[in-house]
Image (cartoon, helix red, strand yellow):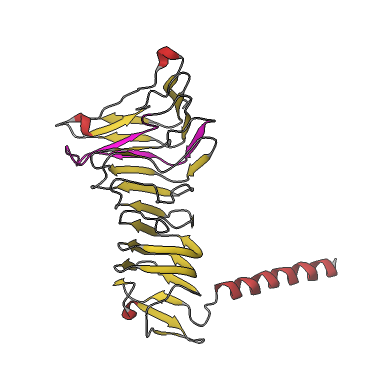
Amino acid sequence: MKNLKLFFSLVVLIFIFIGQLVSQPQVGDYRSAVASGNWGDASSWQTWNGSDWVSAGSPPSGTAGTITIQSGHTINVASAITINGATIVVDGYLKETAAITKTSGTWIINGTFEFAHAPASGQGLPTATWNTGSICLITGITSSTANLNAVQDFYNLVIDCPSWSGNLNFGWGPGTTRNINGNLVVKNTGTGRFQMHNGSAGDPLIVNIYGNIIVDGSNSTSSWTAKLTSNGTSTGGTHIIINVYGNVIVTGKSTNNTWTEFSISRGSQGGTGTAIWRLYGNFTMSDATQNNSTAETSGGVGRFEFRKS
């Protein structure tokens, strides 16, 4: 018994030691030094010299080490940079105003990452671990999401794009499952709408939203709309199942309810296509429009299923 207790004590000490090693900064690591600053300014950063954090002589190159945006700090990428090998930890707020070319590296988002420009190849969202409470805020989409790198799971996903034009999707296709572990918030889709399915035929796309869906069109206009649906114009045989475990809250503007939209489907889906929303929470909708374009007369199914007991 004594030997067993000694063994478990040693195991605990080893894990504590490893944890300390992992959390200890390494020479050349960076962390934000100011409440608000630009990535390219050395004054925005401190670096670890082996015993202490000191003022950085230059901004991080992105090729090695760990770069941390501390909680309560905002770092703006005002000029294009490349991340090639570094580990980026966002505990505060990182705003990508100019493009970050993401060649390689590890991204851990605990705070907010804002994507504030149009996407191009290699410059979309980081393939990241989006931890509990994190926010992926998308503000820069214009007329394409082809290079956004949005085929991944998120915690909170917020769409607020005044220059959005056209009816756009994030490339979520058939036979896959996408998880939003927090809330999906649609605040601004410009003159278009956000569609979850990419329009390809095949096995169902399953979207699990574990928090709330919030469509906030309270400030909408004819060119500043808030619109969400499962799919748009589709080939035959498209299928989607959306499980919403929180509440659905849709708020429009009384002067024109067409500026805010929460629809089952906006594509005919052809033949036996399906768009099924399984709602496990409460549903509230005001001053907004609801549509269903799925061709049910041809055998298709488009519906809300209210599953709360």
Which residue appears at 53% of the width and 79% of the height? 26
Write down the quadrant of residue 94 in the picture: bottom left
Q: Nearer the viewer, residue 232 or 5?
A: 232
Identity of the residue furthest to the top in this view? 297
Which residue appears at 28% of the width and 39% of the height? 166
Q: Is residue 263 left or right of residue 220?
A: right
Residue 309 percent across, percent down from the top left: 48, 25
Rendered view: 93 above or below 27: above
Identity of the residue furthest to the left in this view? 255
Residue 79 percent across, percent down from the top left: 30, 69
Q: Is residue 176 left or right of residue 123?
A: right
Rendered view: 21 above or below 137: below
As for residue 38 lying within the magenta part, the answer is no
As for residue 228 lying within the magenta part, the answer is yes
Q: Nearer the viewer, residue 111 or 240?
A: 240
Which residue appears at 70% of the width and 68% of the height? 12
Rendered view: 104 above or below 228: below
Residue 211 percent across, percent down from the top left: 43, 42
Image: magenta residue range = 204-233
Total residue callouts: 0
Residue 123 percent across, percent down from the top left: 39, 59
Q: Quadrant of the N terminus?
A: bottom right
Write down the quadrant of residue 47 in the picture: bottom left
Which residue appears at 35% of the width and 22% of the height? 293
